[in-house]
Structure formats: C-alpha cells, structure tokens
Image: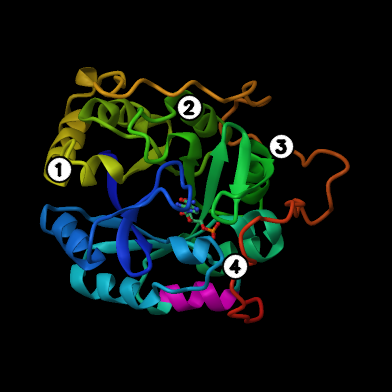
Amino acid sequence: MTLELLPAVDLLDGQAARLVQGVAGTETGYGDPVDAAAGFAAQGARWLHVVDLDAAFGRGPRNRRHLGRIVEAVGPVKVEASGGVRTADDLNALLDLGATRVVIGTAALEDPEWVAEACARHGDGVAVGLDARGRTLQARGWTAAGGDLFEVMVRLEAAGCRRFVHTEVARDGMLTGPATDRLAQVLAATSRPVIASGGVASLDDLRALAALEPDGLEGAIVGKALYAGRFTVADALATLAEAASNPRARAQPSPSPSVGRAPEREGSPPGEPGRGAVHSPPTGEPASGAVHIPPAHTPPSDATGGGRA
Ligand code: AMZ
C-alpha cells in the first residue's frame, strides 16, 4: 500500500501558520489557509490535516469558519480536523462542517471514557491524537504533560479506538527528521493504523516512513517542509508511490543539510513489543484511566459547553 500523505494546515487567528515545537509565539504566518489548502489539493493530495491551534491552546474555537471554507474549497479531498475537541458538541461541530475524521488529543487524557464512547459511536470518524515528548503525552496545546504514550494507546485500543495519530512534539516544525525509532515502537504496540507527524524534512524522510508501512504506518503528516519549500506535495506523492512500488529503494532518513538532528529524548522502549498486545493499566491509576494533568499555564479550554454524546 502507498503511505497516505496529509499536508498540514494549522490555523492561528484565521491564518495558516507553523509553530516551532508547538510553542505559541514562534509562529510564521502563511496567509489565507484556503490558498494553502487549495494548493495542496491541486497537486493531488487526497487528505489534509487541519488543526485549530487557537482551540488547542484553549482560546476558543476561533477557526471553525475557516475549517468550513477549507472543506468546501478542497472537496472531494478529505479533511482530518483537530484542535480543542473536548466535548461531543466540539466533535459534532467539526463533523458537521464536513471533516471526514476528527482527531482528539487532550480529552483522551482528561476524559478517556468519553473518548472511548466517541470512538465507538463514530468509528473511523475519530482518531486519537498521541502528542508526546518521548513517552510522555502532552495536552492543552502541549503546555501540560501527563500520561504514558503506550499505556494510553493500549487502553484506548482495547476500548475500541480505531486509529492513532502520533506526533513527536520535540520534532514538530524542526525539520530534523521523523522519530522513526519511536514510531517503530508505537507500531509494535498496536494493531491499529497509525499516522505519523513531526519532523519530516526531506523526500528521504518520507521514504524512511514508507518503510514502516508494512508494520502498520498508514500516513504521514507534513507541514513545515512544504511551507519552507523543501519539496512539493507533487514530489511527495511521487516519492511515496515510487516507494510503494519499489520497496528496496526505500531510504533511511537523513538529517536536513542545514539543521542537525535533535537529540532523542526517549526513555526505555515499551515493555511489550508484540503487535496488538493489550497492556493492563498500571495499578494505582483511576479506574476510568483518566490521567491527572497539572494545571496548564494557558487559559482553560474554551467553555463552548455541551454534554457528552
Ligand atoms: O502545536 C501545538 N502546540 C499543538 C498542536 N499542533 N497542540 C495541539 N496540536 C494538535 C495535535 C492534535 O492534532 O497534534 O492539536 C490536536 C489535538 O488537540 P487537543 O486540543 O485535542 O489536544
């Protein structure tokens, strides 16, 4: 199978933007997000990954109108939408705007029972976002840490979640290559498809990710490399098609010419490498699996309210 490419359109105050390691204030603006989205679609992308960064930071769902404009402009290209989805109302709003799939991150840590319910109700319409620094999951716009990547993933897989999006936060926006070692561990610990995000800088990085497709990697989200002109969506699609038809030509990721590779932050490998293994939650955790997240230093999540589905 060919690895799916998901060009990223991150929305900040109505603009397409890229952050460095997800830190507010590091953004570079790239204008009207519909222009970026339409450009990626015109080059043949089949999916876009659209993030409402304001909502992820808890500033309220400021960019829904722009998500709707993007869906309308790029159809039939599918849109995976995320950022600030903490309630059934948030989830339904994004699905109603035409998102094919919605990624839920923070709530998977803070309200895992609801996320399991949402997975059961919406099937492939929901994916769980595992944004991590090494093994430690990140929430609320990556301003709060809590939960172990592998424990949460295995628990939510057992609860019926169909798909995971793994982001290596330390590599996001860094152009230092994807976290292929960590990804291999993630793929070994789940039988569900995984989409990788963070660090892609070159076509060789895409070839290295394509080499993980037989292990369950389904797609790659690419942001900064496209906006910085490292390669185009058309180049990326051709590279992935070639890698699928000629697996021996797959390459190892190479550091970008201008930026050294970030040091690995990861800890020890997961205890159970078998695919599809189901881990028990460690003793001492709340029965619900909810993880205590220390108070974030950004405003609390928007109070759009709404009950659980
Ligand atoms: O860049 C960030 N600080 C950031 C970001 N890109 N914070 C969250 N996100 C993305 C995640 C995921 O797609 O990668 O937002 C989504 C998760 O949002 P939430 O609000 O559900 O945790």
Report the residue marked by disc 2: 184
Report the residue marked by disc 4: 86
Q: Between marks 3 and 1, how big is the CA–CA gap? A: 40 Å
Q: Earlier in the sequence, mark 2 or mark 4?
A: 4
Front: mark 2 or 3 = 2
Task: Name the residue located 69 percent from the left edge and 43 percent from the top edge.
Answer: 147
Task: Name the residue located 53 percent from the left edge and 39 percent from the top edge.
Answer: 191
Residue 279: mark in rendering:
3
| Residue neighbourhood size for the residue with mark 1, other residues' Cα within 10 Å, grouped as few (<14), some (14–19), many (≥20) | some
x and y, in percent, of residue 278 in the image: 68, 38
Q: 106 or 297: which is nearer to us?
A: 297
What span is in magenta? Answer: 88-95
x and y, in percent, of residue 60 in the image: 52, 73
Front: mark 3 or 4 = 4
Type of amino acid at the residue the image marks with label 2 = Ala
Report the residue marked by disc 1: 232
Task: Name the residue located 31 percent from the left edge and 25 percent from the top edge.
Answer: 208
Tag 4 secondary structure = loop
Q: Between marks 2 and 3, how big is the CA–CA gap? A: 17 Å
Q: Earlier in the sequence, mark 3 or mark 1?
A: 1
Tag 3 secondary structure = loop
Please report contact status of discs 2 and 3: CB closer than 8 Å, yes or no: no
User: Is residue 226 positioned above or below 53 on the image?
Assistant: above
Q: Earlier in the sequence, mark 1 or mark 4?
A: 4
Q: 152 or 105: which is nearer to us?
A: 105
Task: Name the residue located 27 percent from the left edge and 45 percent from the top edge.
Answer: 5
- Give the image quarter of residue 275: top right
